[in-house]
Image (spheres, rainbow, N blue to C red):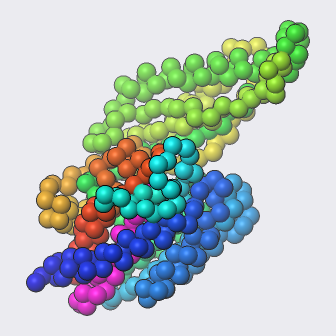
Amino acid sequence: MTDHDRLDAWIDAHFDDEVRFLQALVRVPTDTPPGDNAPHAERTAALLADMGLDASRHAVPEAEVRAQGMASITNLVVRRRFGDGPTVALNAHGDVVPPGDGWTHDPYGGEVVDGRLYGRASAVSKSDFATYTFALRALEALGAPLKGAVELHFTYDEEFGGELGPGFLLRTGATKPDYLLAAGFSYQVITAHNGCLQLEATVHGKMAHAAIPHTGVDALQGATAILAALYAQNALYRTRRSAVPGIDHPYLNVGRIEGGTNTNVVPGRVVLRLDRRMIPEEDPVLVEADVRRVIEEAVRAVPGTSVEIRRLLLARALEPMPAAEPLVRALQRHGEAVFGEPIPTSGTPLYTDARLYGEAGVACALYGAGPRTVLESNAKRADEHLVLEDLRRATKVVARALRDLLG
């Protein structure tokens, strides 16, 4: 048997344990908001300790967490050094959006039906807590001479931008890996992703009784002008094409609108929250300046209204990194061997925590246990699930790739 065969055999022999580990993770809610995620980190650390993996805890100060709109964050780092050589970090996030309505399975049950494990974060991305943990365990069980180190980074701020997850670990010097493998999907290796700008625009008018509207200034009319101007930009964005396969063009979405006090009151204040996705070729500084210009010009056309604009998030795009080629090639080679089909590289229109490692000079790629597409997994929708055979095979791919990188 080759080392790769032995890794496969160990993962097969311990796969029931891996599934139980993932079920235990799914059963502890990490809805964000409210973002009270330290209890999940403690449960994860206890489960890791039962497997002989000691996790160092990196609690984010409460003031920083509260300022971000969450309740608690403790990030975990597991380190295993085998000798002199590169450090490969494996990062997955435990925080997730609330389950919402429409579930036919308990979102926190970890129920297995017809080879699928159901639950919020079962696919994105508690699944890769399991993938990466059991890939590391298989590598240790191999007992082969290795050069380098493996770190597991389990973090809890992806839904709010990652600055208090991987960003906190990198900023405080808790880690400085050479390679980063982030949670992803089994049928492709992601080497690039979109950036994201999120802004809040608060339109001010003047409240008045609806019976005498001329005594007020309707903030909603200003907001309507902004909406029309912003959505008109999407026609322009569709003409800007990315050269990265898997990434199409920029786009803009207004995801939340709040305002007014009652049906019979002219609204004096309306708040819009927008999301502008940026292709890797775009300059975030220029993008933000242009969006602000469009908003301000639209409001100027509505007499009596004014607008305040606040940045909520600026997530830079991840571009393909030549330094990541050894990691990418290993994942592709073993992905094809295990899955029996070519595993392409591509970009994704999502934005991820991987960009934070990339900005720190760490060579990045994304690969993990999920399906072919976000849509297939029902991520962020009812009945999110993971095909367990994808979990098994992705674990083998990651373990084999680690063996090659550290061999």
Query: On the picture, is 316 further left or further right than 303?
Result: left
Query: What residue range appears in magenta?
Result: 123-148
Residue 136 forms part of the magenta stretch? yes
Residue 290 forms part of the magenta stretch? no
Instruction: Name the residue: 27% across, 42% down.
Output: 245
Which residue is nearer to you in this view: 150 or 71? 71
Can residue 294 be seen by looking at this rendering? yes
Q: Position of residue 129 (x, y in %)?
A: 42, 69
Can you tell which quarter of the image residue 10 is in?
bottom left
Q: Position of residue 249 (x, y in %)?
A: 38, 33
User: Farthest residue toward the left?
Assistant: 1
The total number of labels drawn is 0
Quadrant location of the C terminus in the rendered image: bottom left
Please name the predominant secondary structure of the magenta segment in the image.
helix
Can residue 268 be seen by looking at this rendering? no
Q: Position of residue 23 (x, y in %)?
A: 45, 68
Which residue is nearer to you in this view: 151 or 244? 151
Instruction: Name the residue: 57% across, 51% down.
Output: 98
Q: Position of residue 160 (x, y in %)?
A: 58, 53
Instruction: Name the residue: 60% across, 55% down.
Output: 32
Instruction: Name the residue: 63% across, 22% down.
Output: 226
Can you tell which quarter of the image residue 113 is in?
bottom left
Quadrant location of the N terminus in the rendered image: bottom left
Q: Is residue 179 above or below residue 266?
A: below
Can you tell which quarter of the image residue 246 is in?
top left
Q: Is residue 246 above or below residue 368?
A: above
Query: On the picture, is 205 further left or further right than 397?
Result: right
Which residue is nearer to you in this view: 270 or 24? 24
Q: Is residue 124 above or below residue 306?
A: below
